[in-house]
Image (cartoon, rainbow, N blue to C red):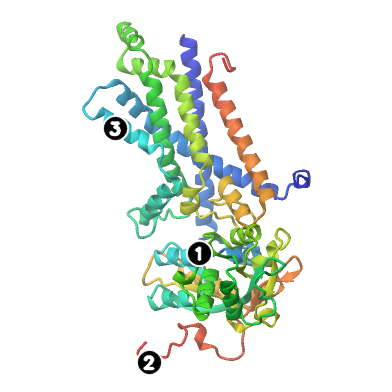
């Protein structure tokens, strides 16, 4: 049973390269947008005391567990020709896939960042403020203090985005062109396609590609987020 | 401390740059179809796609017209539902009853017969229900039910599932007649064949997907379809329908009709005729005929004078 692992790689290089490209493009864009959206929310909710704060926190935490197929269905409804965003013609596009992964990743990034930001001690923020820092400076100091937690949040969001199959399959349609270039096919939907045809060995190979990719992205983020260029 | 802050900002800028670069390069790619031509969205069944026929068929069309065909592989039910919502330009499916509903509701226009193959009843080689001697699909299904042999259904409103229910209907069984021996696979043809393989069960499969997967599974054909002289009931005709531009004005009707013209042309039909997987012919062209065939354009049994 192990022999398939040593035979020739059963895919065209162009096919593999293009599904990796689509996977990374969709997930990295979704995570970048989610981070831009989530960090200010995490900082705001983390610092401010306001009525309904517990409610907001529980909504964020609930969002971390949204089933991806449900998100896919909701986004499909929104972008379908009959839906509110129908005129933009987004069905079966990478943009629609980015939308659904944004919805999936944002609560994870917000929730984990919120926990990280909340754990930065009040006296650190007070000190920054006492040293004459503006509100923006205080926010930067907090982000810097909480950077490991925030990096973890971004990685968790990325992990959620790149590994999910339910929503990208529904809104993306798993399309590859006739010359084998992926249009909306990601590694996960390609795995699904192989597995449902009983080609488990090739599905496993793609799974290995996905794991390596996630490892690489993690390594890069950890390296960027650490002080001296290595993991502390 | 300030150095650390700068490093962090550099990292953040780098991350933003990666995201931005992704956006830009995709804009470039996304722009190409608008320049060179348009995109045709074809929702179709897993069987045409997974067997590799569509890639073979679409490449010359894309070259000639300078367009791209986005083929979305789904079950027949899902393919038609996308077309109902105006999210597809053309559908290629294999369940005449569902196609007829689609036409009658006004969503589809200009249906053509495209090609056919057949369904086969497959199961373990030792054949516990003893259906191998049957040349009648209905009798074979009755035997499976009588002996309560495990049967895996697609259960996904696909063309194959529609045919399966048609045969159960003829055998006089409906949902409440099924016992624990009847498993709802809820997946594509490949998944269902895998489940049947693991459960040692029977299932109804389209010949194309079965031949394509024969290497991976231990199932055998027990009842042949009409391609190998079996009953007509197991015939599996594929049709192609354009989405009605009067219902969904956003659909690319011109290109859909060009595509229908191409796949039903001498060239398109020849590609279907000559397509081989594991040295076996999977699909048989059906669009070309010297005689008139008006039934392909209208729901089955439709007559202009009748009240239907």
Query: Do marks 2 and 3 share a subunit?
Result: no
B100 vs A205, left or right, is left
Q: Is residue B229 above or below residue A11?
A: below
Element assignment for label 2: loop
Tag of residue B306: 2
Nearer mark to the viewer, of 3 and 1: 1
- Counting other residues with Cα less than 10 Å from the Cα at mark 3, is it few (<14), some (14-19), or many (20 or more)? few
Mark 2 and mark 1: Cα distance apart in space: 34 Å
Asked which quadrant contains residue B73, the reply is bottom right
Disc nearer the start of the sequence (2/1): 1
Q: Residue at x 62, y 67 (%)?
A: B202
Element assignment for label 1: loop
Q: Residue at x 46, y 83 (%)?
A: B298
Nearer mark to the viewer, of 2 and 3: 3
Q: Position of residue B154 (x, y in %)?
A: 54, 64
Say which quadrant the C terminus of chain A sits in. top right
Q: B283 or B75: which is nearer to us?
A: B75
Element assignment for label 3: helix
Identify residue for label 3: A56
Q: Residue furthest left?
A: A51
């Amino acid at each position: 049973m192990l022999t398939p692992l040593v035979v020739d790689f059963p895919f065209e290089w162009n096919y593999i390269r293009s599904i990796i490209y689509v996977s990374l493009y969709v997930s990295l864009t979704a995570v970048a947008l989610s981070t831009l959206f989530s960090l200010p929310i995490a900082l705001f909710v983390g610092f401010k005391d306001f009525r309904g704060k517990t409610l907001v926190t529980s909504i964020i935490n609930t969002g971390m567990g949204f089933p991806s197929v449900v998100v896919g269905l909701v986004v499909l409804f929104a972008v379908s020709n009959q839906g509110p965003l129908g005129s933009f013609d987004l069905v079966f596009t990478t943009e629609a896939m980015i939308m659904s992964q944004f919805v999936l990743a944002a609560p994870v990034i917000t929730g984990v960042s919120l926990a990280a930001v909340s754990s930065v001690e009040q006296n650190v923020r007070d000190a920054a403020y006492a040293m004459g820092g503006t509100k923006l400076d205080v926010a930067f100091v907090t982000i810097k203090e909480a950077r490991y937690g925030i990096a973890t949040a971004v990685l968790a969001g990325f992990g959620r985005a790149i590994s999910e199959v339910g929503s990208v399959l529904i809104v993306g349609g798993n399309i590859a062109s006739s010359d084998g270039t992926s249009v909306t096919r990601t590694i996960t939907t390609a795995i699904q396609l192989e597995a449902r045809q009983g080609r488990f060995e090739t599905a496993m190979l793609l799974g290995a590609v996905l794991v390596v990719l996630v490892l690489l992205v993690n390594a890069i983020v950890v390296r960027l987020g650490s002080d001296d260029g290595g993991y502390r | 401390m300030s150095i650390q802050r700068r490093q962090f900002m550099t990292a953040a800028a780098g991350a933003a740059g990666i995201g931005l670069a992704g956006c830009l390069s995709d804009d470039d790619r996304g722009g190409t179809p608008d320049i060179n031509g348009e995109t045709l969205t074809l929702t179709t069944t897993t069987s045409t796609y997974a067997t590799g026929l569509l890639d073979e068929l679409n490449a010359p069309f894309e070259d000639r017209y300078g367009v791209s065909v986005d083929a979305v592989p789904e079950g027949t039910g899902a393919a038609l539902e996308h077309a109902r919502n105006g999210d597809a330009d053309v559908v290629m499916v294999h369940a005449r009853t569902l196609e007829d509903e689609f036409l009658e509701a006004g969503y589809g226009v200009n249906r053509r017969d495209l090609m056919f193959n057949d369904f086969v009843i497959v199961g373990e080689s030792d054949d516990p229900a003893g259906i191998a001697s049957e040349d009648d699909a209905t009798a074979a299904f009755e035997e499976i039910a009588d002996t309560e042999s495990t049967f895996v259904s697609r259960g996904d409103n696909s063309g194959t599932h529609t045919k399966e229910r048609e045969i159960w209907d003829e055998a006089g069984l409906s949902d409440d007649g099924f016992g624990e021996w009847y498993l709802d696979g809820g997946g594509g043809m490949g998944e269902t064949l895998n489940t049947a393989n693991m459960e040692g069960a029977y299932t109804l499969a389209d010949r194309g997907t079965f031949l394509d997967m024969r290497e991976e599974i231990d199932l055998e054909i027990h009842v042949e379809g009409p391609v190998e002289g079996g009953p007509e009931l197991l015939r599996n005709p594929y049709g192609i329908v354009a989405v009605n531009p009067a219902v969904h004005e956003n659909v690319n009707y011109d290109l859909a009709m060009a595509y229908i013209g191409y796949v039903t042309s001498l060239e398109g039909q020849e590609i279907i005729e000559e397509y081989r997987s594991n040295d076996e012919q999977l699909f048989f062209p059906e669009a070309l005929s010297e005689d008139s065939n008006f039934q392909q354009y209208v729901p089955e049994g439709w007559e202009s004078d009748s009240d239907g």
